[in-house]
Amino acid sequence: MTPHNHAKQGDYAEAVLLPGDPLRAKWIAETFFENPKLVNSVRNCLGYTGTWKGKPISVQASGMGQPSLSIYVHELINTYGAKTLIRVGTCGGLNAKVKVRDVILVQAASTDSAIVKGRFGAFNFAPIADFGLLRSAADKADAKGLKFHAGNMLSSDIFYHVDGFAGYDKLPDHGVIGVEMEAAALYTLAARFGVKALTICTMTDCLITHEEISADARQTSLKDMVELALDVAVEA
């Protein structure tokens, strides 16, 4: 147990999905898991364990932003023995070629966060996904006929940027295709502790075209993304 998690040793599977939203964690467990069991409810940051296609799997809400995610990921790895962590979430689009409902496999994560930058002194550490997970996700997305992009994501600590899209204007010119708030910290911690990590996002709103996904389309798209993540996680 930790100050943030009252699960017992063995309550989590080695493979864990990480949505930000506690209610999305609940939805994933109740929609996809066989025999889901609630293992954590501290601060309503819900965690569940069950099985997917007969294999053990967990889901743990990480909260919003890199500071919150870092707490749960650190404890999942060091207290509960997690070996494979896959963030499943939504993101904004920074490149017009990425359309709403497209899936982004986050190959690398740029960031403005001191959580990553403050650790490495003069060096610019590059947080990247586990290649095996990334390759598996790409292969499975192809097999499922999902439209996806693999590339560089911005993990920002700022949701309401004072300069709007202009605050990100140099990033699309260098291949950054979307913005979210967690992947860079996840990849940094995975590297630090020698485990596997991947972030898979559905693009729900474009900061360039201002196109947004409808509520019905969002639910369908998230279902496709979660099924992809589950298939990757249990085979890692």
Image: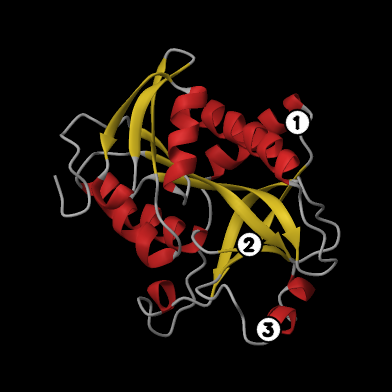
Task: Kindly indicate whether the residue at mark 3 contacts the one at mark 1 (C-beta within 8 angstroms).
Answer: no
> What SS does tag 3 mark?
helix
Relative image position of residue 188 (x, y in whole percent)? 41, 61
Front of the two marks 1 and 3:
3
Q: Is residue 226 visible?
A: yes
| Residue for point 30% across, 31% down | 38
- State the image quarter where residue 227 is shown: top right
Q: Is residue 160 above or below residue 49?
A: below
User: What is the secondary structure assignment of the residue under circle 1?
Assistant: helix
Residue for badge 3: 167
Amino acid type, residue under disc 3 in the picture: Gly
Residue 80 horizontal side relative to residue 54, left or right: left
Q: Which residue is mark 2?
A: 153
Residue kind at label 2, given as amino acid type: Met
Mark 1 vs mark 3: which is more N-terminal?
Answer: 1
Residue at the disc numbered 1: 142
What residue is drawn where x is 49% and y is 14%? 53
Q: Give the side of residue 144 with respect to residue 136, left or right.
A: right
